[in-house]
Image: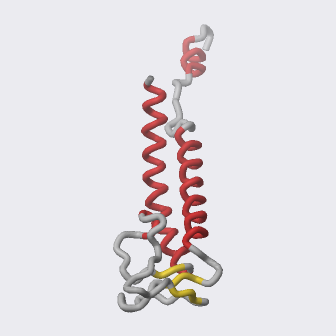
Amino acid sequence: MLRVLKCTTKFVLVLFVMTIINAIVWEYVAGDLYDCTDRGIPGYLEPGHWVHSRDGYPVAIAHHVVHGRSMSEPDTIKAGWSVASLLLLWWSFLGASLLVSFLLARVRWIPVTRPNNSLHATAAAPGS
C-alpha cells in the first residue's frame, strides 16, 4: 500500500512539473504556429481554444504569424496548420508527459544506503 502511495505521489508530482514545462515550451513552439488576440492563460492549458472566429471574421491564414495585434483583428494560424493539427501536437506533449511521469514514478528517487558492515567485521576480527 505504501509503495502505491509513493508511486502515485511521484507520478502526480512529475506530471505537475511536466505541465509547467510543457506550458513554457508550448508558448515558444506554438507561438510560431498561431496567434489569438484575446489570450489570457497559456495556450497549453486551453487545448482546442487557440484560435477562433470572432465578430464575423474567420480565422486568418498567415505565412508568418505576427503577435501583439489589436483584438479587433482576426486570430491567425500558420499556413498548413489547423486546430486539429495543433490538437495532435498538444496530445503528443501530453503523451510525453504521461510517459515521463509513469517512468519516473517507478524509479527509486533516493537510494537506500546500508551501513558498511565489512569495516565492523574487520575491526572485530581476532589478530587485527
Quadrant housing the C terminus? top right
Give 79 or 112, whichever is nearer the viewer: 79
Q: Position of residue 83 (x, y in %)?
A: 55, 71
Q: Position of residue 33 (x, y in %)?
A: 56, 79
Q: Residue at x 46, y 65 (%)?
A: 44
Q: Residue furthest front?
A: 56
Q: Residue at x 57, y 89 (%)?
A: 62
Q: Residue furthest top?
A: 126
Q: Position of residue 99 (x, y in %)?
A: 59, 48
Q: Position of residue 104 (x, y in %)?
A: 55, 43
Above or below — where is 112 with respect to 17?
Answer: above
Q: Residue at x 42, y 39 (%)?
A: 9
Q: Residue at x 36, y 80 (%)?
A: 38
Quadrant housing the N terminus? top left
Q: How is the image coloured?
A: secondary structure
Give 44 or 75, whichever is nearer the viewer: 75
- 36 left or right, relative to 117: left
Give 91 or 27, whichever is nearer the viewer: 91
